[in-house]
Amino acid sequence: MAAEKNRCLECDAPCCRNLVMPITRPKNRYELDLLKWYLHYDTVQIFISNHRWHLLIEGKCIYLSKSNNCTQYALRPEVCREHSSDSCETTGKWYDKIFSTPEQLEKFMKQKKTKRRK
């Protein structure tokens, strides 16, 4: 059986270019307005994966080299060590729903509210 190819060697390192943080689903108008405000920034998106909400902020890790290698690999944080190529953003669709604008989020929330009423 052939050894599995290390996907990271040919990757452009999206895991080192996107900061993803879990957030809670908005439960009231204030929380929704806050998430919509985040989406006013062109480096921010919100996505839902497996019924869990996340804030995605585009940026580059300061330790990422021009060749997409970690210059602090031996000292990298635990969250980086736990990231697996099996759950990598490059292996397929990593979200169920993604929002880039306040209008997209508002429309989604209105549709969810309408479905609950029925």
Image (cartoon, rainbow, N blue to C red):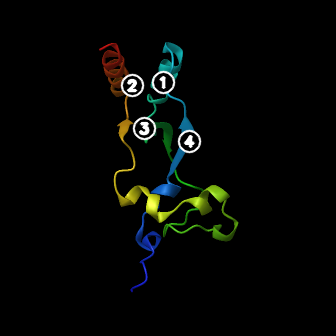
Residue type pointed to by label 1:
Trp
Q: Disc 4 versus disc 2: distance between alpha carbons?
A: 18 Å
The numbered mark, 4 or 3, whose residue comes first in the sequence reads: 4
Q: Residue 37 bears which disc, if any?
A: 1
Task: Pinpoint residue 105: horizontal percent, then vertical percent.
Answer: 38, 26
Vertical side of 85 occupied by 29: above or below: above
The numbered mark, 4 or 2, whose residue comes first in the sequence reads: 4
| Residue drawn at the location 50% of the way across and 28% of the way down | 25
Task: Pinpoint residue 86: horizontal percent, then vertical percent.
Answer: 45, 63
| SS under mark 1 | helix
| Residue drawn at the location 42% of the way across and 78% of the way down | 4
Query: Mark 1 and 2 residues: CB-CB less than 8 Å, in contact?
Result: yes
The residue that label 3 is drawn on is 48
Residue type pointed to by label 4:
Met
Residue farthest to the front, as pictured: 118
Q: Disc 2 versus disc 3: distance between alpha carbons?
A: 15 Å
The residue that label 2 is drawn on is 102
Residue type pointed to by label 2:
Pro
Residue farthest to the right, as pictured: 75
| Residue drawn at the location 37% of the way across and 38% of the way down | 98
| SS under mark 4 | strand
| SS under mark 2 | helix
Vertical side of 112 occupied by 69: above or below: below
